[in-house]
Structures are given as structure tokens and as C-alpha cells.
Amino acid sequence: MNKKNDKNKELLSVYEDVMLPNYAPADFIPDRALGSRVWDKNNKEYIDLGGGIAVNSLGHSNPILIKALNDQANKLWHTSNYLSNEPAINLAKKLTELTFAEKVYFSNSGSEANEAAIKIARKFHHDRGENRDELISFENSFHGRSILNISMGGSENHKKGFEPLLSGIKHAKYNDISSVENLVSNKTTAIIIEPVQGEAGVYEADKSFLISLRELCDKNGTLLIMDEVQSGIGRTGHLYGYMKYGIEPDILTSAKGLGGGIPIGATLTKNNIAPSLSTGTHGSTFGGNPIACAVSNKVLEIVSNPTFLDEVKLKEKLMMDLLKEISSKTHVFSGLRSSGLWICCDIKDVDAFELLDRCYENGLILVTAGNKALRFAPALNISEDDISEGLGNLTKALNQI
Ligand SMILES: Cc1ncc(COP(=O)(O)O)c(C=O)c1O
């Protein structure tokens, strides 16, 4: 393409001029999208198997979500938290009906949902006169990019240069109960865990480990927080990841797929804990926004349908079968894991970001997990044809390296 007519390049040169350099975006700019297909500024078509990192749960421009958004946009946009609104009340009601939770707090992102979770946990113990000033999180975990969340997260890269971090946070080994036992005490406010570690590369917690973790929390009077920001809303083939383990958290955080592409965060908890977030103790200007909640209501209605969740598991099998076939032909993968429509391929001998560029060239949008793995988190309603075509594009990309 003549550089002069390249609308992607034109915009990206403006990007470089005006945006902070914390991201290194792809060399094309998405312009419009439908379902699991995306077109860039030059009208090139891509299959989207990254799903906006597990956010576009029902695909792009979903007509049901557009209707919910437009209907609400024509009625009421914003109220402030001096007032409540019907979509937020309905969404909280649905979340409590569908999960362990009895009370909900809304925010705008996963990081904020976690911030609220930790504040609730601290205040809960404070209100009981307990002096608990430690938290336990896990190695390789990811909880967001605020100072609290990088302090809890397992990545040293995310922390470097941002010190001082929050003190009193200890990191245990995932799926190793004795490493948690060694750290837990009557000082532990809460243990925060992803039931499936997403950014680390789709690693599921063992059932026996999570059951023991629940018991350990009960024994020590410590709250169990599940960060389901990425694993929630049908991603694993269950509405929330914890549901397949037969245990319940005390607090759960949700975001990403909950809004289907509209920013929203939610922190869920039980009646015995909720009073600690008493009036005036926490808040958010935009949390519980009527438009975000109206869209989320529809997302939740669709995704919580057991037939829909069964189809997620069927599509997981289809994708895994195809990926195993690709793996045996190309010999590029050194590991393959899935948890619903959430799949990770470890790759050998090639940098994941280099491979990602080849995928883009071949009309495929994906994400990575570190620089040694490719991650798939497509729309949960993706068609079988889009899966096959997308993985066909992956094969083309793999053949080029
Ligand atoms: C498990 C988990 N928690 C929290 C977050 C942070 O969410 P947000 O980027 O919406 O703040 C993420 C984002 O990837 C996540 O995967």
C-alpha cells in the first residue's frame, strides 16, 4: 500500500506524537467490527480470537447489547451516587440471584473492584477490633496496575520504579497449600486468588488446593477473595470460575466480560461482611452507571443461560482439537492449556510478540501471556466457522516463522 494512503500509519504517527508510550499497539487501527470480525482503517479484515482480552464476551456490535445501550442512552446516562438507578439495582439483583453473593458494589474496572475488595476486608476486621495488616496473594498472579494491585501481583516488572509499594503483602505459591500455611497468621486480612491465573497463562487452581485454602481461611478467620475479573462471566464454561470447585469465596471481583466491552467493575460479598462498607466509607463517581449496568444486565442474562455455557465448553473442545492438530503439524507449541474458551499455547524458539505480528499480518487478532505464550479469549458466542478460519490464519502465521 502506498504509504500516503495508509490510514493506519497516518493515525499511528499521530498516536506516537500524543500518547504516553506505556503501550506498544499493533501497526493497524481497528475501525469497525461485527461479531468476531474486525476491519482496520484500510479495510483489512481480521478474525478476533483475543476478544479484547476476555472483554467482548458477546462479540463486537452485538445487536442485543446495542439495543440495551441505546434504550438506556435515550433515558438516563448518569445520576451520581446521591441517587440510584434501575439498571444498577436490577444488575445487583441478578448477580446476587446467580452467585454466592448477597450484596454488590459497582465500580468501573477490575483494579477498582479489587481495591474495594481489599478495603472491605480491612474494614471488616477493623470493625471487629482485630489488628490484621497483612495480605496473601500468589506468585505469577495479576490483579491490575494500581499501586495496591501491582503490590499484590506477582510481576517484578510491574513494580519496578513504582516503589514504595503497599507493605504487608506476602506471595505464596499457586497450588501449594503448605506455602500458604507457612504465611497465614492471625495478622492475615485476606487471601486473594484467581481461580484460574489468566495473565500467567491460563493455569487452573487444583480443586483440592482451593478446598484447603477455604478451610485455611475459615480456621484463621481470614477472608477469601476471588479475583474473577478475567475468569468470570462464562469464560471458563461456568458463570464464575469458583462454581466448578464446590466452594465459595467471601468476596469476589468481576469486570472485563461483565460489560461486554462497556467499562464496569463489581465487588460481590455476603450479608455478614457487607455492613463494613457503611455509608460514606467508599465510593466512585461513575460506578453503577446506568448505561454500563443496562448493557451488563443483558450480558448476564445471556451468559448465565446453562445452554449458552454448555456451548462454551463445546467450542473449547473444537478449538483445542484444532490447536492440537496445528501443534502436531507445526511443532511450535510446547504446551497447551484451556479453561473454557480461554486457551494458552506455550511456544518455543520464537518470541510471542514476533508471532503476534505475523498473526496480525495474516488477519488474526490474538493476545499473548508474557513473551512465551499465545492466549485466546474469543467472544463466547463465536461461530465455529470463525474459529476454523481464525485458526487457519494462525497456521499461515506459524508457517512464516
Ligand atoms: C485477574 C485480573 N484482575 C484484575 C485485572 C485488572 O483489571 P482492569 O484492567 O480492568 O483494571 C485484570 C486485567 O487483566 C485481571 O486479569
Image (spheres, rainbow, N blue to C red):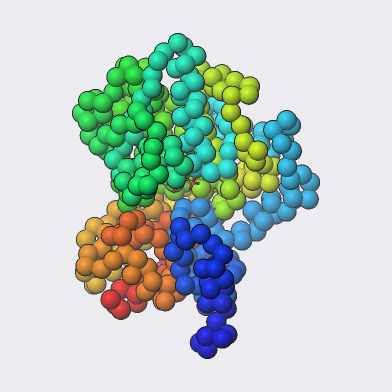
Residue that lies at the very extreme toward the top in this rendered image = 129
Q: Is residue 101 visible from the viewing direction of this image?
A: yes
Quadrant in the rendering for residue 284: top right
Q: Is residue 101 above or below residue 74?
A: above
Q: Residue at x 33, y 50 (%)?
A: 157
Q: Residue at x 46, y 24 (%)?
A: 121
Residue 136 is situated, as x and y percent measured from the top left of the image, at 33, 30
Quadrant in the rendering for residue 76: top right
Quadrant hosting ligand 1? top left
* Most foreground residue, 333 or 141: 141
Q: Is residue 318 visible from the viewing direction of this image?
A: no
Q: Residue at x 68, y 39 (%)?
A: 87
Q: Where's the C terminus, which quadrant? A: bottom left
Residue 65 is situated, as x and y percent measured from the top left of the image, at 64, 53
Q: Quick check: 61 left or right of 328?
A: right
Q: Residue at x 52, y 88 (%)?
A: 2
Residue 167 is situated, as x and y percent measured from the top left of the image, at 36, 30
